[in-house]
Amino acid sequence: MSEQNKKINRRDFIKIVGITSAATSAAFYGCNVNGEKALDNNALGEVPTDKMTFRTFPGLDDDVSLLGYGCMRWPTIPAPDGNGDLIDQDAVNELVDYAIAHGVNYFDTSPVYVQGWSEKATGIALKRHPRDKVFIATKLSNFRDHSYESGLAMYRKSMEDLQTDYLDYYLLHSIGGGGVEAFNKRYIDNGLLDFLLKEREAGRIRKLGFSFHGTVDVFDHLLTLQDEIHWDFVQIQLNYMDWKHATGRNVNADYLYDELTKLKIPSIIMEPLLGGRLSNVPDHIVERLKQRNTEGSVASWAFRFAGSPEYVLTVLSGMTYMEHLQDNIRTYSPLVPLTDDDKDFLEETAQLMMKYPTIPCNDCKYCMPCPYGIDIPAVLLHYNKCVNEGNTPKSRDDENYKKARRAFLVGYDRSVPKLRQASHCIGCDQCLPTCPQKINISKQLHRIDSFVEQLKQETL
């Protein structure tokens, strides 16, 4: 088949694909692809309504809930016409209402989340609550079009979709990829940063910051601009794996956090679960965590780690299901900070986790849509799930070869439709520039496809 014939336009892609955030988020929290809850995540006990931990810092003057709602993975339902999925607005409203009733007041979204529909759904849900009771954060996500006109239109569209005339926290989105030159092209050379600074002066942006995925030289450069720009906050990837063992082009979180603290810049935390990989862990890691704290969930360890540093303002979690929200509220109502022994225990756990060669996909979906219809995150997440469960046999001589082979192949077909599997990757690499984890996606897809074929042909 020619490359031209294999391509599909965005509208046809949406009809075939829909949105898959609910299914992949389920896997993150230990649910199966049908949304059935794992025992570890059953909501147990009371969910407090008045014990949420709040943080504030000089210059911010906002009492922000330590648990922030990341709006990247809103629940979805099948579209009435059968073409893909739509955001389940009723479920979003229910989750937002519950979160606010239990102390959550920070909501983080972006023009690119949930294939461009997150801001509108978030705006509908929040409009039903007093504006001064919540903090709304969104981003200038100008990954592809760096023009001033496009950036201005995106900024204004965010205001429109969120149904607000001011934004509490506004971020330059995912700075770091492509080096300082890319940062200058996106925000300096085109005058967009100057515009945003004026918007902050006018009060339409209350706090201005950036989210970071990249190399240390870019991060250091951004901090040298502090006297000129005065970043109000910075959003970083922080969890007990990335604290000292960041992979790819990411920077160890202990360095990022310490440098921000030196300048008294509050940190907002993303990826506390490392894209769910710190809740969907191998069984022996689950047993290790449970032995130390029989009542807490696996995920609660990661959230306590992310929330314990004193200069953390809020920790974002993309909570698709009510039990995720309840578990996280319980963890932060109130936060029980980690002891030094707890931190040593999690560092040992991180070193054990490093022995499992999972792909660092966080299901952000920045790589989507694929022009050839591949569900990139679903493919990578299925592979990771099988690694954690011991279902990636190295040869036919493995003791559990037959069981692992069946689990991988049957699970693959169930979680990823055949038209969206890795076999359709032609290596166009259109997905590479937007991946914040800098995964060589086409290489990984080809590797997984080769592994699948070896399992099918039994040639391992």
Image (cartoon, rainbow, N blue to C red):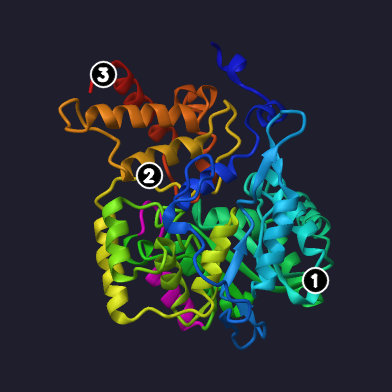
Of the image marks 1 and 2, the number of the one nearer the N terminus: 1
Chain part drawn in magenta: 246-263
Q: In this view, does 44 lie to the left or right of 100?
A: left
Callout 1: SS: loop
Please give the residue where the numbered disc 1 appears in the rendered image. Answer: 204
List x then y, in percent, for residue 265: 54, 79
List x then y, in percent, for residue 119: 73, 54
Please give the residue where the numbered disc 3 appears in the rendered image. Answer: 458
Q: Quadrant of the C terminus?
A: top left
Gap between marks 1 and 2, in whole Å? 40 Å
List x then y, in percent, for residue 72: 61, 53
Amino acid on which disc 2 is placed: Ile
Amino acid on which disc 1 is placed: Arg
Of the image marks 3 and 2, the number of the one nearer the N terminus: 2
Please give the residue where the numbered disc 2 appears in the rendered image. Answer: 359
Residue in the foreground of this view, choosing between 91 and 377? 91
List x then y, in percent, for residue 458: 26, 18
